[in-house]
Amino acid sequence: MKVGVLQFFSWPGRHGPLEEVFSRALERIEIMDKGGFDAVWLAEHHFTTFSVCPSVHMMGTMAAARTERLRIGTAVSLASLYHPLRLAEEVALLDNLSGGRVNWGAGRGFAHSEFSAFGVPPAESAERFREAVDIVLQAWTQESLTWKSAHFSFEGVEVLPKPLQRPHPPVWMAASSESAIDWAASRGFSILMDPHASRAELGAKRRHYGERMKQAGYSDRGRDIPMARLLALAPNSAEAEAIARRGAKWLVDSYAGPQHRKTLNAPRTYGGKEPVQFYVDDVIIHGSPDKVIDEIARLREEAGLNYLMCAPLSRESFRILADKVVPRL
């Protein structure tokens, strides 16, 4: 099983100097490079302390400079907010600077605050996202690119540099909703699965993706399908649950806070539970190293997990993950 880390750049309560958020993350990335991790997946967000990394491509160059073997993933490049030619250039440049270590994950985004600030009408965001993905892939593989649509228009453009990986870096689409899964499967794209789904939802979505791939004439066999999971690790279950509860409260307050209450997603019901309790009970994997390894094995059996994308909820959780869990997976 491959193991990566979904790296947020959270600044909870604005505690401490902002630069420490970045320095701690880069130190963690260096540890990943020396351990058994496959990749770091960098999360892009805007205008929120939930994660203060607005450019995963710029951060990716720093990660690449401090590592030798770790793959540099974007989880995700918010493609609907970019001009696709600029996006193609930035990811290709990162692939060259990293020695061909980029995993490109692309997503639409969900927050009206981001679309509004960047002048992207939410109603157009899905179409812009899908066009952007097509343009980026063509820009990487064609010498000259011409495009004309309601959103983008250019003629005879040669995008340079081309990616170092040929024909292009491996590609994933973020897909949390059924419609996003259906579109990705219809195009034969591999998907990134979100950290907010319950364990039951995760398995159902994974099965739905496999069915839709088959219907579209593709196979999901042998594909790396990263499943993002929030992790709270401690020497014993009680301490781990306390970390999980603190993490869930921070997550609900920031991710579902006032700046994100208006989103493209349907309102969440949290399985009829209080939101923090829903995350503790149904989403966050928490416990001692042995218990967490058992939970991961359960996901492997029930949801077809073959690539665990971890989001540790504390520094202690990451340390235990690196020292006592990853070596056993």
Image (cartoon, helix red, strand yellow):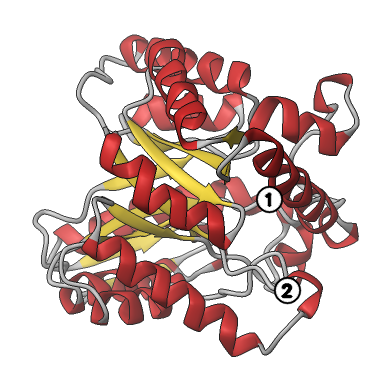
Q: Dividing the image into 4 quarters, which one contains the N terminus?
A: top left
Secondary structure beneath dot 2 equals loop
Q: Is residue 122 visible?
A: yes
Image location (x, y in percent) of residue 123: 72, 48
**Residue at 82% of width from left, 28% of height from top?**
270
Q: Is residue 306 left or right of residue 259?
A: left
Depicted 225 relative to depicted 157: above or below: above
Q: Dividing the image into 4 quarters, which one contains the C terminus?
A: top left
Q: Label 1, on which residue?
A: 110
**Between 264 and 135, which is closer to the camera in this rendering?**
264
**Residue at 28% of width from left, 35% of height from top?**
328
Q: Is residue 165 left or right of residue 183?
A: left
User: Among all residues in the image, which is located at the extreme front?
Assistant: 235
Q: Label 2, on which residue?
A: 47
Residue 300: which quarter of the image? top left
Callout 2 amino acid:
Phe
Q: Is residue 267 visible?
A: no
Q: Is residue 43 left or right of residue 304?
A: right
Image location (x, y in percent) of residue 321: 43, 48
**Residue at 68% of width from left, 50% of height from top?**
110
